[in-house]
Amino acid sequence: MYVADSRSSKAPVAPAETRPGRREAADGRRTAARAAVPGTVVALGVVSLVTDVSSEMVSAVLPLYLLTGLGLSPLGFGLLDGIQNGFSAVVRLAGGHLADRRGRDGTPRHKAVAAVGYGLSALSKPLLLLVHTVPLIGAVLAVDRTGKGLRTAPRDAMISLATEPSHRGRAFGVHRAMDTAGALFGPLAAFLVLRTAGGPLLADGGQQQGYHAVFAVSACVAVLGVLVLLLFVPNRPAGAEAGEGPAAHPRLRDGLALLRIPGLRRLTVCAVLLGLTTVSDSFLYLLVQRRLGLATEYFPLLPLGTAGAFLLLAVPLGALADRIGRRRLFLAGHGVLLLAYGLLLSPLDGPAVVGCVLLLHGAFYAATDGVLAAAAADTVPAGQRGAGLALVGTGQALARFACSLMFGALWSAVGGTTALTWSALALAGCVTGAAFVLREPATAIATTTTATNDPEAHP
């Protein structure tokens, strides 16, 4: 309790500007805020920020590079876009499983597995300079997504293990905000590099120096992210949970057996259900660009709207999830995405509409990305945190892989607007179904009570 709260009501009152209790209370609030977000979370946030600058530089120009420069069809692009999610899903389980295994000193290998993942993603960036055909580009993207799949579960496990259970929503929000700062700077950096190096690739397959410059700068930034991880992230974060597990060498099927936990099983089912109707960012930006008729050189700036909203809302929505319930906010976020689809399909037009669509898109990520990880962490024993988070992430990634394939096929068959209409209707149905799956008794306040390591304690 703060000093200002514990004073007797009969004590003499000092002037507001000299009242020591108020000053001590403010200091106490700042200390509590720092305790809610440990240094490990901040260090991992810096790693994610730097790495996301690198990744988003490539992601911002890749749709135009493939569709305009290489003449790829929407169906072919859907396949490649799905590969990014599919390969990540294939290895995510392995990443979580390997991270939970302990070394000779009894320390989990979260940092080591995460470092391998970040290293693979860094390696893929210069490879883009050497490949110029769709199959080879797909292989390079598979390497990049393999790295992302390996690192995601160990990184989120380190965040959850270093943070008090009651503050996990805020901690994940801080991390995702820093991660999104990279997503904000990445497209801007790609835009500046393209303008400096000679502009985007011509439709007839002409100059490619602009894209090559983006890939080269991206590779250098990715290496910096790996160095920050190795030098500044502790191997064993000091936090609320020791992370003791049932065995030093858990088997992969032990991780799959976590689906017997009711809370984790429900979250995984809902992540899959909603992922099947979540249109990929690249397709959404292409729809926005074609509706406005924007020049191709401005296409890399569209993700800035999403990233800006995500950056501003990640921390407050993470803290809100700690208060009202993480699963509840996760569902509300998909409702916000449905509003974005409806606005994009409406007869309204103009830059203001596009700005609202991107704002809603960013709010969707702020209400779902870190919130889902925090909700999953509440249901899994500390010693199997990596495997449990990987299960939920794998289900979601595989579902989004399938969605990319289906949406690309629909776009090729009936057009982008009709495909988005069908996706919006399906999303509305899936949100309703997920609300039924995640329903909980009125007396349950699981996300606002002190979490335990008993998986059955979380419905």
Image (cartoon, rainbow, N blue to C red):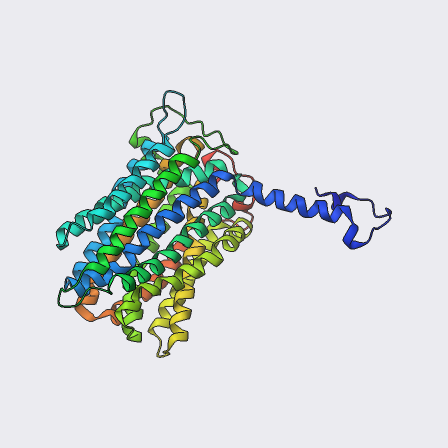
Residue drawn where x is 38% and y is 65% of the image: 338
Residue 10 to residue 67: above or below? above
Which residue lies most toward the top here? 104
388 relative to 10, above or below: above
Quadrant showing the N terminus = top right
Please give left or right for residue 244 compared with residue 198 in the image. right
The structure residue drawn at horizontal position 30% and vertical position 66%, both measured from the top left corner, is: 299
Q: Nearer the viewer, residue 71 or 403?
A: 71
Q: Position of residue 377 (x, y in %)?
A: 44, 40
Vertical placement of 305 versus 24: above or below?
Answer: below
Q: Is residue 408 above or below residue 176?
A: below
- Which of the 4 image quarters holds residue 340? bottom left
Determine the residue positioned at 35% across, 28% down: 101
Residue 350 or 348: which is nearer the viewer?
350
Percent position of residue 247, x then y: 38, 24
Residue 83 location (% of width, % of height): 22, 51
- Residue 321 percent across, percent down from the top left: 51, 51
Residue 459 appears in the rendering: no
- Taking the spot 25% from the left edge, 55% from the top edge, the residue there is 213
